[in-house]
């Protein structure tokens, strides 16, 4: 979808095509395109069908608002989930009168949350299509009066003129998605330079950002939504309570680094798999303290314990059997347990899971969780009950 075809969608004719495309949702794509082209030209029909599909996909991130919003494929991929953007706005203390500079706004996911909280947002992006989509979204959600969106280079922003600098640098290069901060746009050095001049700063990054790219003055928060790590957020401009933090959404539980070192010890009756945000934030010691657990291997993020402690910070499994890794022994053990289906997890193991699944040749009517890991630096398998209990706040 290019700028011209998107602009056409905003016309009465385009909105009519989009409404018809949404009515055809779920129909055979070829049949839908054929039907739409009876009343609209091919370019508009294609743009409408693309937008209808994107709106359907966007419901997972934006809920009911997706039906009124506009998207691009790349913009939707990088856009912040509405619940995460709202959490970030709360942490910023977003309120009427606060002036925010958004230096790479994309389709506007974050600026919408800030504007809905009352902030005045001035945003820029280098992509004309993204600017047009962000403007349309601000209009669609009724916050256009609090938002200014321009085509421009975020590097030229004067962060000193605002209360808050927000940056969500694009993580795509000409070769596709990139995990190298130096390939972000704006590049990481540019983002950090802007951050250094801001009164208060908030920068969204990929959850796997290497620690060496995080400035010493920042607090970094890894955010998990329903068990999936979504992003890392760097915060500056206030005295940080901690250098590292993990947050669970939608509940809002947070865990801060306290320098806890987990003890090591043997595998017990239970094994705990920490939430990915806690793993990224290096809070394994803090999670181990919550469950009274220990590390069977000091280099692996699995925790073991003897008591069934409920916590939202880790999924608990009951260990049926522990054995040294051996395909023959594992196959025999699973057969003895009557396991016909296995959920295979691994940390610290080089085993190819899909190949192992085929080699096991499972048969039976029971299910197990098979954890491939290391215990005291030795390849080990934990065969666990597959039914983790409902987790509670802790």
Image (cartoon, rainbow, N blue to C red):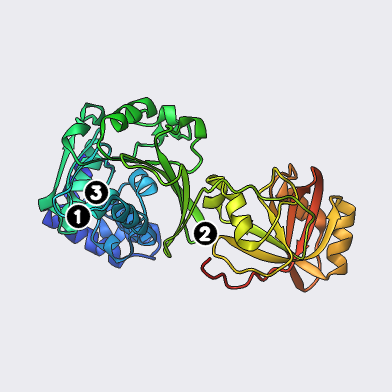
Residue 276, percent from left and from top: 55, 52
Question: Residue at the location (14% across, 56% down)?
Answer: 13
Counting labels gives 3
Residue 186 visible in the shown view: no
- Circles 2 and 3, Cβ within 8 Å, touching? The answer is no
Measured from the top left, where is residue 313 in percent x and y?
55, 60
Tag 3, which secondary structure? helix
- Label 3: few (<14), some (14–19) or many (≥20) C-alpha neighbours in 10 Å: many
Please indicate whether residue 163 sits to the left or right of residue 268 in the image. Answer: left
Query: On screen, 40 above or below 191?
Result: below
Other-residue count near label 1 (Cα within 10 Å), few / some / many at <14 / 14–19 / ≥20: some
Q: Residue 111 carries which label?
A: 3
Q: Mark 2 points at which residue?
A: 227
In the image, what residue occupies the spot 18% across and 51% down?
119
Q: Is residue 215 above or below residue 392?
A: above
Give the mark, 1 or 3, whose residue is nearer the N terminus: 1
Quadrant containing the N terminus is: top left
Residue on which disc 1 sits: 95
């Amino acid at each position: 979808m290019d700028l011209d075809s998107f602009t056409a969608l905003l016309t009465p004719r385009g909105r009519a095509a989009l409404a018809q495309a949404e009515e055809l949702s779920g129909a055979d794509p070829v049949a839908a395109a054929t039907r739409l082209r009876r009343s609209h030209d091919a370019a508009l029909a294609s743009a409408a069908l693309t937008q209808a599909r994107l709106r359907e996909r966007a419901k997972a991130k934006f809920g009911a608002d997706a039906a009124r919003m506009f998207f691009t494929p790349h913009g939707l991929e990088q856009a912040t989930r509405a619940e995460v953007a709202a959490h970030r706005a709360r942490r910023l203390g977003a309120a009427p009168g606060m002036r925010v500079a958004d230096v790479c706004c994309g389709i506007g996911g974050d600026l919408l949350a800030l504007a809905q909280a009352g902030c005045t947002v001035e945003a820029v992006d280098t992509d004309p299509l993204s600017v047009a989509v962000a403007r349309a979204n601000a209009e669609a959600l009724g916050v256009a009066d609090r938002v200014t969106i321009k085509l421009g280079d975020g590097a030229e922003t004067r962060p000193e003129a605002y209360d808050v600098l927000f940056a969500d640098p694009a993580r795509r290069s000409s070769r596709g998605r990139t995990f190298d901060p130096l390939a972000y746009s704006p590049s990481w050095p540019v983002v950090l330079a802007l951050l250094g001049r801001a009164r208060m700063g908030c920068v969204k990054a990929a959850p796997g950002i290497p620690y060496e790219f995080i400035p010493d003055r920042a607090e970094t928060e890894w955010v998990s939504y329903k068990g999936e790590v979504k992003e890392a957020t760097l915060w500056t401009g206030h005295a940080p309570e901690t250098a590292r933090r993990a947050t669970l959404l939608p509940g809002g539980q947070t865990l801060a680094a306290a320098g806890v070192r987990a003890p090591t010890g043997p595998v017990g009756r239970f094994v705990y798999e920490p939430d990915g945000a806690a793993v990224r934030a290096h809070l394994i010691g803090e999670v181990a303290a919550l469950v009274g657990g220990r590390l069977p291997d000091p280099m692996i993020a699995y925790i073991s314990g003897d008591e069934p402690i409920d916590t939202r910070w880790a999924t608990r499994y009951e260990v049926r059997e522990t054995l040294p890794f051996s395909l023959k022994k594992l196959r025999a053990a699973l057969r003895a347990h009557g396991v016909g289906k296995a959920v295979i997890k691994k940390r610290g193991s080089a085993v190819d899971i899909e190949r192992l699944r085929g080699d096991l040749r499972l048969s039976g009517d029971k299910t197990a969780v098979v954890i491939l890991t290391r215990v005291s630096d030795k390849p080990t398998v934990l065969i666990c009950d597959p039914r983790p209990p409902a987790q509670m706040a802790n």
